Image (cartoon, rainbow, N blue to C red):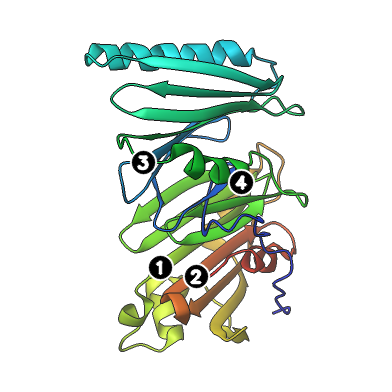
Amino acid sequence: MRPIARAGAPARHLNTLPVPIGWQGISLQVPAEWYLKGYTGDWREGYLQIGSPTTTEIDIKWVRSRRKTDLHFVLQQFLKRLERDKRKRRHKFTGSIQAIDDHLLEFRWSADERGLGQIRRCAECQTIVLIQIRTASKHEPLYQIARPIFETLTDHPDEEGWVRWSLYGLDTALPARFRLEKAQVLTGQTRLQFRYRRERVLVERIARAEQLLKGYNFEEWVNLWLKWEAYRGEREPFEQEGDTGLHLSTQLGLGALIPESLMSLPVLHLPAYRVRMLAWLCPQRNAVFHILHRSPRRTDLLEEVMARTLCH
């Protein structure tokens, strides 16, 4: 196994907000104990909801399109729908819009809740993102809370072309060419599966590692829990910054290679027959991280993803 360097890990924003949230290329940082509450959609269009320990919540909507859209019209439609909903519930509604520049509008509204937000358009790719923070509390200082959060909002890959994914204790990054194929969020386990053509990457975080490992050494547990026993090849131990782990490099067996090859033929792509895996224990967070990469060619992507998978 090649040495693993931590260089290239996601850079921390100058803002001191401690909790990163990243989903479908939309990322921001929020105060301690805030969390991703819900999500829908995909890379092109979707919605995020972020909760807090109080009644305060953040809503984020995005649309990626090459078509230039009238921001003021989009925001007016959003506020009209919100007003209709509030009036149906017999709440008085007031709202206002302020233009900052051609690519940024700010807005406020008040009903049974208070809301403060922005709608912005990327001048390069025309991506539109609407973010608002709202609360039922009459005393929550929305502007003071919102401003540092809004400053961390990004809708682009980083300068090296990587997209951050951060939710439920898993904080990692993938090249922008990969799209999320499947997400599983179970009790104590966050699992994301990505795909680009025939190439696939799985990244997962498993909590309560100390309890789960009782009665097993690490290799036994990896073989059983992560199903490494299905793959031939030598398990190579490694240690990185105090974390212990295992690396496995192998190839698909004949039974799995045949259907993989047949699925690759219609699109003229090489089958992803090379398989590499990493699993390591992060004691300070009592978690195990696992990355599986299937590719048609030799690549350092496994190490690069590990370097960007943070234990915090």
User: Residue at image x 61%, y 59%?
Assistant: 294
Instruction: Tell me: residue 178, above or below residue 73.
Output: below
- Nearer-N-terminus badge (1/3): 3
Q: How far across and down, in percent of the image, does residue 27 sit?
A: 57, 45
Q: Secondary structure at mark 1?
A: strand
Mark 3: secondary structure: loop
Q: Earlier in the sequence, mark 4 or mark 2?
A: 4
Residue denoted by label 1: 206
Asked if residue 13 is positioned above or below residue 205 in the image, the reply reads above
The front one of 254 and 18 is 18
Which image quadrant is residue 252 in? bottom right
Q: Mark 4: which amino acid?
A: Thr
Give, as a three-letter code, the residue at label 1: Ile
**First in residue order: circle 1 vs circle 2:** 1
Residue found at x 64% / y 53%: 174
Residue 289: which disc?
Answer: 2
Position of the N terminus, as image quadrant, is bottom right
Q: Is residue 54 left or right of residue 226?
A: left
Instruction: State whether residue 171 is above or below residue 234.
Output: above
Judged by depth in the image, the label closer to the viewer, 3 or 2, is 3
Mark 3 vs 2, N-terminal side: 3
Dot 4 corresponds to which residue? 152
Question: Pointer 3: what residue?
Answer: 56
Report how far apart the C-alphas of labels 4 and 2 lie in the structure.
26 Å
Helix, strand, or loop for circle 4? loop
